[in-house]
Image: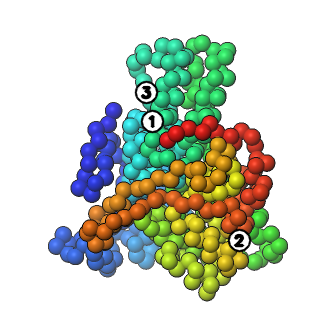
Amino acid sequence: MSEHTENEQGFISTSKKVGVSRDFSPPRDPKADPLVPVSSEDSTKEDTTRKIVQNGDETDGVVTVGDSEEEEKEIKPLESIIYENGKLKILNQLMIPLKQEYEEIEAIEDGWAAIRLMKVRGAPAIAMVGAMSLVVELSNREDSKLESKEQLRDFIDRNFEYLKTARKTACNLERAKSDVLKFFDEQAKNEDDVEKLRNAVINEIEKMLIVDKENNFKIGEHGTKAILKGKDKDSTVSILTHCNTGSLATAGYGTALGVIRKLHEMEQLEMAYCTETRPYNQGSRLTAYELVTEKIPGTLITDSMVAAVIQQKKVDAVIVGADRIAKNGDVANKIGTLSLAVVAKYFGVPFYVAAPTSNFDFSMEKGEDIPIEVRPEHELVAVAGIRIAAPGIDTWNPAFDVTPAELITGGFITEKGVFMPSQVVTLDPELQLKNEEY
């Protein structure tokens, strides 16, 4: 169990072992104006490179802070989740882009807190961290409370239900629960040994990490084929995206950003435009960081510049992710997605949603049935603990909006192919989830 404490910004922090960190922030005079950024010229230039740490070890990749021959070295993609032999670490995304810090998840409560506080975010990554925190519990339990398969099933069920309370809009964690319990019930038909059943469940959940990454590769392939259809092999395209849908939001590679990554690998990406994605700035903090780290051509814009960039620049398609997709094709995604879809429709730019089929929830007939999370006020009125809004102003801070199916003009890019909204109901009937109150 973890001790939960509240810091001065109102965030809950969990005391735990902290993994490797790297800090890119220049030194600040404590007496300086906190609203004025520190110039990079103020930081020391003696150490022009810093080692990247992944999987707890130093890699050959470097991040340059000055001119150096090391600039040409390849930097490995970021990893938001590191798991090995019952040990789980997550990249604390609240620290990016100034620092990379991995935190160890030692219990279910740690996984819940990491999801709730958005240290890890993105529908696929939320499901992975939730499920893997259950694996940590199952791998390291030394008590004898789980003496029967009924007790084991109840333990799995109850902990998934608890994890779901951290954030309610994305459906991937519910999908993970459904899949794990279905697997358990099949195994339990012919097996009474609790230890064997526990190990079987652990192995099944561990496979989810591999499957998620494989599905993202497929999404990248299907997406590039759809976007490049009718274009010659030497042509390039520019893509506009929103929020963060890359390696940091998944087990690896990404969904919408995975399509962009694949276009870059094919040398057919001219430019990736990313919105800053207020109020939590997942675009400026995370997507921009991924683009810079992997040297993918990218340009950061404010959310209010979307119409202007489509009007004045070459934008061939808009690609976003999804947190939950209703049976009729309506999409709940990061707040601001609806605005992008409306603008794209006006300018005749194809609007795609890149998401695994685990994001489809047929228990939701339409978008208005999807529960929308409302985040705390301080996330809107303050940045890094510094208030930027007038004291006393009321706030409304929904984390997601719902985009009607008719605005998904390009289609849904999934691991199974690209589907138009009218084709959603033809997808695998196993997409049906049990409708539950959150």
Q: Nearer the viewer, mark 1 or mark 3?
A: 1
Foreground residue among 300 and 9: 9
- Badge 2 element: loop
Percent across and percent down for residue 75 are 53, 62
Can you identify the residue that label 2 sits on?
350
Taking 245 as reference, is 8 left or right? left
Foreground residue among 252 and 72: 252
Disc number at residue 162? 1
Density class for disc 3 (Cα within 10 Å; few <14, some 14-19, many ≥20) is: few
- Badge 3 element: helix
Q: Is 88 rendered above or below residue 271? A: above
Amino acid at circle 2: Pro
Taking 137 as reference, is 436 left or right? right
Percent across and percent down for residue 97 are 41, 64
Label whose residue precedes the other's in the sequence (1 or 2): 1
Label whose residue precedes the other's in the sequence (3 or 2): 3
